[in-house]
Image: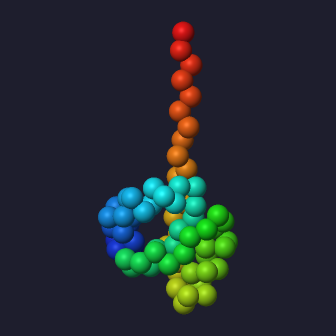
Amino acid sequence: MREKEIQWLRDHQDQVERLQGKWIAVEGDILIAEGDTFNAVYETAKEKGVEIPFLFLVPPKEDVVFVGF
C-alpha cells in the first residue's frame, strides 16, 4: 500500500484544497507534479524517475445551490 502518500494527503490538507480539480502525483512525502490531466501528471512523474506514480484527482469544490420556498 502507499501509506506515505496517503499520509501526505492527510497532513497537507491546506495544500490539497488549493489544488481542487487538479491531478497530483505524490512520491513518498513529496508532491512531485500537478496538472489538469492524468496523462500530463503521469508523464511528468515518469520523467522525474518515478516507476509507478501515485496519482490522485483532488475533488473539485462543489457549488451548493439552494432552492428555497
Residue occupying image coordinates x 45% and y 60%:
16
- Does residue 39 appear in the picture of this structure? yes
Q: Residue furthest top?
A: 69
**Residue 41 found in image quarter:** bottom right
Is 61 above or below relative to 48?
A: above
Residue occupying image coordinates x 51% and y 64%:
56
**Residue 10 found in image quarter:** bottom left
| 29 sits to left or right of 54 | left
Q: How many marks?
A: 0
User: Residue 36 at x, y = what percent?
Assistant: 64, 64
- Does residue 1 appear in the picture of this structure? no
| 67 sits to left or right of 31 | right
Q: Camera-side residue: 52 or 15?
A: 15
User: Residue 37 at x, y = what percent?
Assistant: 66, 65
User: Residue 61 at x, y = what percent?
Assistant: 52, 46
**In the rendered view of the protein, which quadrant contains the C terminus?**
top right
Residue occupying image coordinates x 64% and y 80%:
43
| Colouring | rainbow
User: Residue 50 at x, y = what percent?
Assistant: 52, 85
Is 10 above or below relative to 42?
A: above
Q: Camera-side residue: 47 or 2?
A: 47
Q: Residue furthest bottom?
A: 49
| 39 sits to left or right of 55 | right
Residue occupying image coordinates x 46% and y 75%:
31
**In the rendered view of the protein, which quadrant contains the N terminus?**
bottom left
